[in-house]
Image (tube, helix red, strand yellow):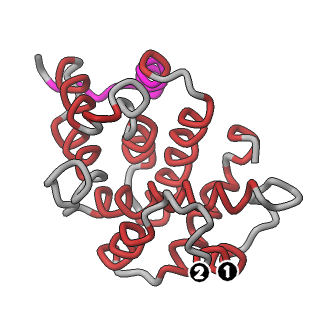
C-alpha cells in the first residue's frame, strides 16, 4: 500500500474507532492542539504535527500492553506515511519503544505528551478547572509536589525539554498557550 497523507477527518474517525474513554479522547485533542501551536511557532506544518498528535495514543485504550507497537501496525495497515508512524513511535522512546526522537516534530511530541497530562491535572484542581487563568508558575509549584499527578513521568518531560533545547518553564508556557486555543473543545 502506498503511503497517503490522511485527512483530519480520517484521523479523527480512526481515533474514535479505537477509543471510547472521554479522558483519552480529550488528551488526544489537547496534544493535537499543542502540536499545532508548536508547529506554528516552529514554522512547520500544523496539519501534519496536529494529525500526529491526535493519534499518538491510538492503541492505548484497547492495547495498553502493546502501546506504540499496535499503533504502528494499525497505521501501516492503513498506509500512513512512514515518517508519521516513526514520529508516533518516538513518543514512547525509552518506555515502550527504542525509537529516539530526532526531528523537531518528534522531539516536541516526546516532550509535550506527558506535559499535557500534567497541565491538565493542574487545571482540574483549580477552582476554575481551566487553563485560561493558569500560568507556568502555578504548574511549576505542583511540579515540586511529587505526590501530585504521580503517574506523570517528569523525567520524560525534562528530557524532552532538553532535547528541544528549551527551558522547562518555556515549554510549560507554550503547552498552556496551545491548550488555551482549544480549551472549549477539551472542557478547560
Can you give x and y, in whole percent of width and height, for residue 179 in the image?
64, 54
Outermost residue on the right side: it is: 127
Residue 53, given in percent of the width and then of the height, sits at: 42, 44
Place residue 146 in its image quadrant. bottom right
Q: Secondary structure at mark 2?
A: loop
Q: Count residues near mark 2 (Cα–Cα under 10 Å), then give few for <14, some for 14-19, many for 20+.
A: few
User: What's drawn in magenta, residue-wise?
Assistant: 3-15
Give the distance between the C-alpha atoms of the residues marked 1 and 2, in whole angstroms: 6 Å
Q: Quadrant of residue 144?
A: bottom right
In the image: residue 104, left or right of residue 77: right
Q: Considering depth in this image, is 3 or 142 the residue closer to the camera?
A: 142
Q: Main secondary structure of the magenta part?
A: helix
Q: State yes or no: residue 6 in magenta.
A: yes
Q: Image quadrant for the N terminus?
A: top left
| Residue at 25% in and 48% down | 87
On the image, numbered disc 2 is attached to which residue?
Answer: 144
Secondary element type, mark 1: helix
Would you say residue 72 sits in the magenta stretch?
Answer: no
Residue denoted by label 1: 141
Q: Would you say the residues marked 1 and 2 are in contact, meaning their CB atoms lie under 8 Å apart?
A: yes
Please give the name of the residue rendered at 60% of the width and 36% of the height, measured from the top-left corner.
Answer: 23
Vertical relation: 93 (above or below) 12: below
Q: Nearer the viewer, residue 146 or 184?
A: 146
Q: Total number of numbered labels?
A: 2
Q: Residue at x 67, y 46 (%)?
A: 182
Q: From what the image shows, is residue 153 above or below residue 162?
A: above
For the point 28% across and 51% down, the residue is 92
Q: Position of residue 71 (x, y in %)?
A: 27, 31
Amino acid at each position: 500500500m502506498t503511503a497517503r497523507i490522511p485527512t483530519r477527518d480520517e484521523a479523527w474517525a480512526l481515533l474514535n474507532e479505537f477509543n471510547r474513554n472521554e479522558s483519552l479522547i480529550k488528551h488526544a485533542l489537547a496534544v493535537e492542539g499543542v502540536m499545532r501551536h508548536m508547529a506554528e511557532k516552529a514554522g512547520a506544518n500544523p496539519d501534519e504535527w496536529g494529525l500526529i498528535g491526535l493519534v499518538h495514543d491510538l492503541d492505548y485504550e484497547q492495547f495498553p500492553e502493546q502501546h506504540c507497537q499496535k499503533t504502528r501496525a494499525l497505521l501501516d495497515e492503513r498506509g500512513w506515511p512512514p515518517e508519521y508512524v516513526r514520529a508516533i513511535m518516538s513518543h514512547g522512546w525509552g518506555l515502550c519503544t527504542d525509537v529516539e526522537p530526532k526531528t523537531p516534530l518528534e522531539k516536541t511530541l516526546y516532550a509535550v505528551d506527558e506535559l499535557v497530562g500534567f497541565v491538565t491535572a493542574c487545571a482540574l484542581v483549580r477552582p476554575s478547572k481551566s487553563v485560561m487563568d493558569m500560568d507556568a508558575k502555578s504548574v511549576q509549584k505542583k511540579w515540586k509536589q511529587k505526590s501530585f499527578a504521580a503517574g506523570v513521568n517528569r523525567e520524560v518531560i525534562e528530557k524532552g525539554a532538553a532535547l528541544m533545547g528549551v527551558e522547562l518553564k518555556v515549554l510549560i508556557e507554550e503547552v498552556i498557550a496551545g491548550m488555551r486555543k482549544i480549551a472549549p473543545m477539551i472542557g478547560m
